[in-house]
Image (tube, rainbow, N blue to C red):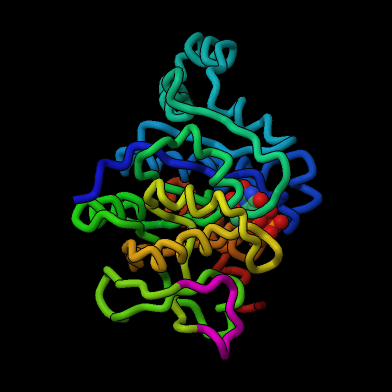
Amino acid sequence: MGNKVTTAVFPVAGLGTRFLPATKSVPKEIMTLVDRPLIQYAIDEARAAGITEFIFVTSRGKGALEDYFDLAPNLEEELRRKGKEDMLEVLAKTNMDSGAIAYIRQHKALGLGHAVWCARRLIGDQPFAVILPDDVIAAEKPCLQQMVEAYDETGGNMVAAMEVPAEKTSSYGILDVENNDGKLLDVNGMVEKPAADESPSNLAVIGRYILSPNVLKNLDEMKKGAGGEIQLTDAIAAELEQKNKVYGYRFEGQRFDCGSKSGFLQATVSYGLARAELRDDLAGYIKSIAPTL
Ligand code: UTP
């Protein structure tokens, strides 16, 4: 029922203040989980979901991101000369076809909604995905792929949903849902960062979205929301007022908040343990220090 989703927007124009001073010169999305930058996990997930057009909303100081997706002729030549085929294969995943990737600047960090709006001309009049690379999701079937499969049946708008403890609702966009069971949730309303006693549920929106182009029109209004920022949540909630459908999708998988230091460290341990060549060493170390914790 939904049109095919082939475009994804990656808003990476935030300041990343929680990781200062590292993010003074290194974009948050280039920070590394084991041996791959966060952005590579996001790109791999998008590709698995059938995305072929990649739009990055960037800002000053994000040049390392653009370089990351470029060819590295000298390095590749050197690896070839040394017969390091396995490394060449790893590098191939970082390359993009010419014309498949576009960068647009958000000149001021006015909020996630504003960042997505900056990409409106590149997106055009088609449904599109939004991926926040600092939400890393470990899943057997990548999260966006799960959502695209559900969206093919439903159309409308779809946001990834996850239960959070009551005291954490003020850090998320929260869903007001018709039914709180099953994977597909019928959304009646959305609130950005509600206090625990005003929260309509404990179902939080996390960084994967499939949106109708109408959301971009809603963003034209430039309404400031929670924290004085132009919120994507508000533009999606406006869809409900216009009687357009919004679904929550309770994905299968474990999400790590790599925008926070603790989440990033947890992801590092988890992804490290998942790697056969690291597992024994790392598990041995964790076991050795566990009794002292
Ligand atoms: P965050 O709320 O994590 O903000 O943004 P941040 O600036 O990246 O990090 P902190 O809070 O200062 O540590 C969530 C996502 O939205 C993007 C960010 O790049 C991140 O992917 N974003 C946010 C923008 O692209 N532009 C904005 O104006 C705000």
Q: Nearer the viewer, residue 227 or 163?
A: 227
Which residue in the rendered view is the most extreme toward the bottom? 197
In the foreground, 235 or 275 = 235
- Residue drawn 62% across the image and 59% down it: 223
Q: Residue at x 40, y 46 (%)?
A: 213
- Can residue 228 be seen here? yes
Residue 45 drawn at (x, y percent): 39, 45
Residue 162's place in the image compared with 12, above or below, is below
Q: Provide residue 135's location: percent of width, then percent of height.
A: 51, 56
Residue 192 drawn in magenta:
yes
**Image-based side of 20 in relation to 158, left or right:** right
- Quarter location, residue 64: top right
Q: Looking at the image, how many numbered discs can be counted on the residues?
A: 0
Q: Is residue 246 left or right of residue 22?
A: left
Is 274 situated above or below 75? below
State the image coordinates of residue 192 (x, y, percent, origin top left): 56, 70
> Which quadrant of the view contains residue 236?
bottom left
For the record, the magenta segment spans 190-199
Q: Nearer the viewer, residue 71 or 53?
A: 53
Residue 199: x and y, percent?
Answer: 52, 84
One can see residue 251 in this view: no
Residue positioned 47% across, 44% down in the render: 41
Height in image: 10 above or below 287? Answer: above
